[in-house]
Amino acid sequence: MKGNLRALALAGVSGAVLALGVSDAMAGAFGIREQSTIAAGLADAGAASGAGGVSSMFWNPATVTMRPGWVSEQNFTFINLSGDIRTQPGTSPGFAALGNSGEIGQGAVVPSGATSYQLNDRLWVGLQTGAPFGLVTKPNPVWAGEVYARSSRIFSLNINPVIGYKVNEWLSVAAGPTFEYFKLNLKSAFPFSPLIPPANLPTAILKGESWGVGFTAGVLVTPWAGTQVGVGYRSSVNHGIEGLLLLPPINPLIAPKTAVKAILDTPDKVSFGITQALSPVARVNFGFEWDNWSRLGVIPVTSIVTGAAVQALPLNYKDGFTYSVGAEYEWSPALTVRAGVSYEQSPIDFSNRSARLPDADRINLAVGASYRWSEKLTLNAAYSHLFVDRGRLLAGPGRDYDSRYIAAPAIPITFAGLAEGSADIVSVGIRYVFGEPAAPIAPAPLVRKY
């Protein structure tokens, strides 16, 4: 009985240690792509080839060599996520009567920044910071899927210093370490007894944190004036998440506090971009991203004290793919406008969709602009809307338990739902050039007005 109760608790609380809510963050699974206001206005098209400004270092650190002197960009993005999960036939009786999730989305501000500094005609250093993973979602505290998700809070911070080297007039390379912090707090209903009505179930909590280290590397090629091609790589970061499973004090046979750990490797990413000048004032950008989400299969959750597996997290993601195209036009010497569209094939479909992470494929439509306030200061803004496909989900025995680690609970609870979601994203940022304007890097690419 004790093992079955613990299985129920862990199934609900840690059903996905790194899961978020409807359409998660603004990239497949629990990724956040919002790292550049300029790139956001292009739907991230050409970000790996430098179209995203100094902040393109997130996708390709070799873009640090594109701008002379000392340049810094700071971005702030507000993600207004909206979505719900509607209860469908197949949900366990008693829970089905609790109804839909209600509005599950929560607004969040994502800061990011990037700075490049030219040491000499060949060498640059840079620093990129941001939140590559995370979001906050909160359905109704009492709803049909409460055993699998009551709330999710994820926070991450990544610090990425880079060194860039201009090999010759057409080739640049760069690399650097990444230091990543990750924190989570997940809540779910705890069905400790079939005698307790579903509407009165207490809450169990899983929380933990971790620091991990990875690296980035990239190449930037300018085969001729007006054309830039970039390829960037972000490695996986190994997180040994340690924390606590907090259960309601309802049974002296069940420890209310258990120290647990889980090993998770974040997906590595490959980004490819092309920027092509159509005229001195117009450019078109193309982008492609591959995220290795398939490395996240089944993740055991174990007791720190005994080392025994107490649950498994059957994420079983597939790889994610994003395709984007965008264009920008220098309306005047001070104003540049841009727009873009992208399509993302999510790593999540019906086979692995859960109540905590009912992600689906999406289309992103974006517009943006940059205003050159002075020789030193440029103001950037962008708006985009995400259209997320509907997604059916089925949580319960056979989907959320792995018999290799722990037996399914004696009280099976099934939840069937239909998830819908969308998002409005507003980003603002500044770009500032410190010191006296530096001489252009020869041979200079087309002069950018942002």
Image (cartoon, helix red, strand yellow):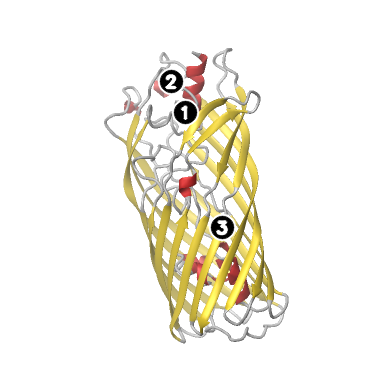
Residue 122: mark in rendering: none
- Residue holding disc 2: 409
Q: Where is residue 201 in the image (x, y as percent from the top left)?
A: 46, 22
- For the residue pair 97 and 40, the one nearer the viewer reads as 40
- Residue holding disc 1: 11
Quarter holding residue 92: top left
- Residue holding disc 3: 234
Q: Is residue 91 left or right of residue 216?
A: left
Q: Sequence order check: which comes first, mark 3 or mark 1? A: 1
- Are the residues flagged by discs 2 and 1 in contact, CB closer than 8 Å? yes
Q: How many marks?
A: 3
Label 3 SS: strand
Q: Which amino acid does label 3 sit on?
A: Arg
Label 1 SS: helix
Question: What's the CA distance linking mark 2 and mark 3?
Answer: 39 Å
Q: Position of residue 184 (x, y in %)?
A: 57, 40
Q: Residue furthest left?
A: 89
- Are the residues flagged by discs 3 and 1 in contact, CB closer than 8 Å? no
Q: Sequence order check: which comes first, mark 2 or mark 1? A: 1
